[in-house]
Image (tube, helix red, strand yellow):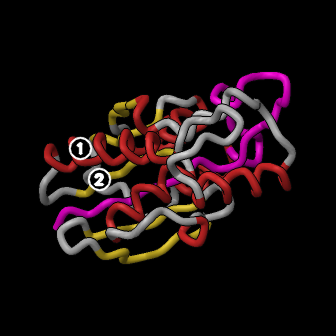
Amino acid sequence: MTKLIYITHPSVEIVPNIRIDTWQLSEEGQKAAKRLSKLNFYKNVRLVYSSREPKAIETAQILSEKYHFKIKSYKELNELNRSSTGFILPDEYIKAIQYVYQYPDRSFQGWEKLDKSYERNTEVLQEIIKKHVGDLIIIIGHGQSGTLIKCWIKKIKPSWAEDPKTTGCYFIADLNTNKILQDWTKY
């Protein structure tokens, strides 16, 4: 069985005046990543895939310190590019994310279109799957990217209903049967 564990980074240090894609884990996020390392996922894992964003790489590095696996990062696993607006308040952010799910072929105020993010995330996932048939694949990324991958696995349209709506979660999927074995779970 080819199995995927998709892990979202935990909470970040929000710094409104710097680029979102450079944010790092908060102190609580670092503690959450250490809790994540106690889960029994990593036996015999030699390689973990990650987004290139610092919050995802930092999560992977905390796990690698304990389990000594290699980390391969792909920019295609980065989250939806929202650099045109930078930080927006949480209530506004929720409305914006709901908008991009509802209108995946449109840009919200200059953001990357969800369709484009879906395409790049699922294309790199398919490359990874080809390299690891019958293996456990672990990817560390972002809630929105994970939602797109989860919906691709389930062969459904990406939607807000499938989004974890928080950081620090994971889901597990059987890629041979396209079944979600465990839905988003907080760690």
Which quadrant is home to the N terminus? Answer: bottom left
Q: Mark 2 or mark 1: name the one nearer the start of the chain.
A: 1
- Where 133 falls versus 27 (above or below)? below
Identity of the amino acid at label 1?
Ile
**Left or right placement of residue 4 versus residue 97 in this view:** left
Label tally:
2
Place of residue 23 in the rendered image (x, y in percent of width and height, measured from the top left): 70, 30
Q: Residue at x 75, y 56 (%)?
A: 94
Place of residue 91 in the rendered image (x, y in percent of width and height, measured from the top left): 85, 55
Identify the magenta region: 1-29
Q: Residue at x 21, y 41 (%)?
A: 127
- Where 57 falls versus 187 (above or below)? above
Place of residue 74 in the rendered image (x, y in percent of width and height, measured from the top left): 38, 31
Task: Find residue 50 and name its label.
Answer: none
Circle 2 sits in a helix, a strand or a loop, which is it? strand
Which quadrant is home to the C terminus? Answer: bottom right
